[in-house]
Amino acid sequence: MELLTRRSALSVLSIALLTGCVPDFDVDETIIVADQIIAVNADPPEAAAGDPVEYTALVVSPDGTITDARLNWKHCQDIKPQAELGPVSARCVQGDPEATLPISAAEPVSATMPIDACRYYGPDSPPTSTGEAGRPADPDVTGGYRQPVRVALGDSVSFYEHRISCGLAGASQEQSADFRRRTRRNRNPDIDQMLIVRADGTEEEARNNDLITLAPGEEIELVVRWPECPTEAVCGDGVCLPDENAEDCRDDCRLLRTCEGAETYVAFDPLERVVVTRRESMRVAWLATQPGLVQPRTGVAADDTATESRNRFVAPTTPGVLSLYVVLRDERGGTTWQTLQLEVVP
């Protein structure tokens, strides 16, 4: 789900998490100052061991999008020593061949979810071939598990956490069966609409890579919207919720149709030891090649039914063209993005 970035593959401490959990630094986090990977999309965003997957990276520079970036992709496959800090082992950060599985860089970037993903990064008993006794991984806040994907752009190394479809740890057979019956794999969100709202209240819809003209110093409001997902089980609405099934709602559930917004999902609560129903929160990261964005991150909490998030942008006072990137993520690792070109014209 998250994109972790390391400027040097040998640095274990320099982590930037491009979501709502980024530490505060005395810098403007909205400005792109170097060539970097700012997002990774996995299709599908949740996969079982052995499933085919495809990866796409959004690579940018201070001059805009890089379409011919040479990236090196690998799956981590290493047990992180308990004494090490960070989400992945130092050997995987360094790209050690004994701690990683190579992924073809041909476009599209096609791979297979590692067959031992739930052993290295999930609830299954981990292998002991490394010589260190491992322990099963702990679930994240959504009750899921993540396979680290290492992607390098030169000496800058980033990690995308790809959600793995694994079983449950600590659940009874009845709870595990209930979870398997009701669980729905995550789906990538979709940017349903992007709006530019001017100071006079006029709205302009902006599609991917559209060129928007601004006056020097003009302030606009940016609105990103995603589809509304149902929260109540209703047959015929095109979405198979956890409490629906193919017998009662064949059209919705025969193909386990899901939603491209804030989805309802099931998870195992290890404290209460029950299978619970939750709703995804949504997060938006905002970046640009020049200053002007008011906030680096916005979003909607899981208990908020809103289907949009807003930010403001103040145009530079000098003429020119800049790129603006909007990255939408759901709580379980689904990712999508949209790019805008903003031209300042006197």
Image (spheres, grey):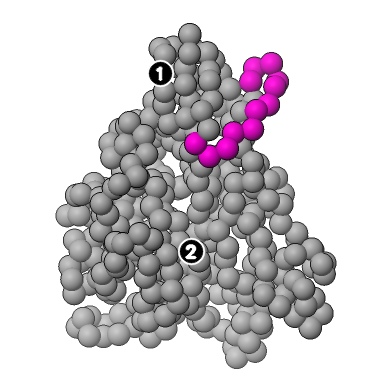
Residue positioned 52% across, 58% down in the render: 334
Return the residue at label 1.
320
Residue positioned 45% across, 56% down in the render: 41
Residue positioned 25% across, 58% down in the render: 72
Identify the image quadrant of residue 34: top left
At which x and y percent is residue 176?
A: 60, 85
* Residue type, mark 2 in image: Asp
Q: Is the residue 201 above or below the residue 304 in the image?
A: above
Question: Magenta-highlighted stretch: main secondary structure?
Answer: loop
At which x and y percent is residue 121?
A: 38, 74
Give the structural element (helix, strand or loop) at label 1: strand
Q: Which residues are magenta?
A: 198-209
- As drawn, is 15 to the left or to the right of 171? left
Identify the image quadrant of residue 240: bottom right
Q: Is the residue 222 above or below the residue 139 in the image?
A: above
Q: What's the distance in space between the residues labelled 2 and 1, CA to CA? A: 36 Å
- As drawn, is 328 to the left or to the right of 98? right
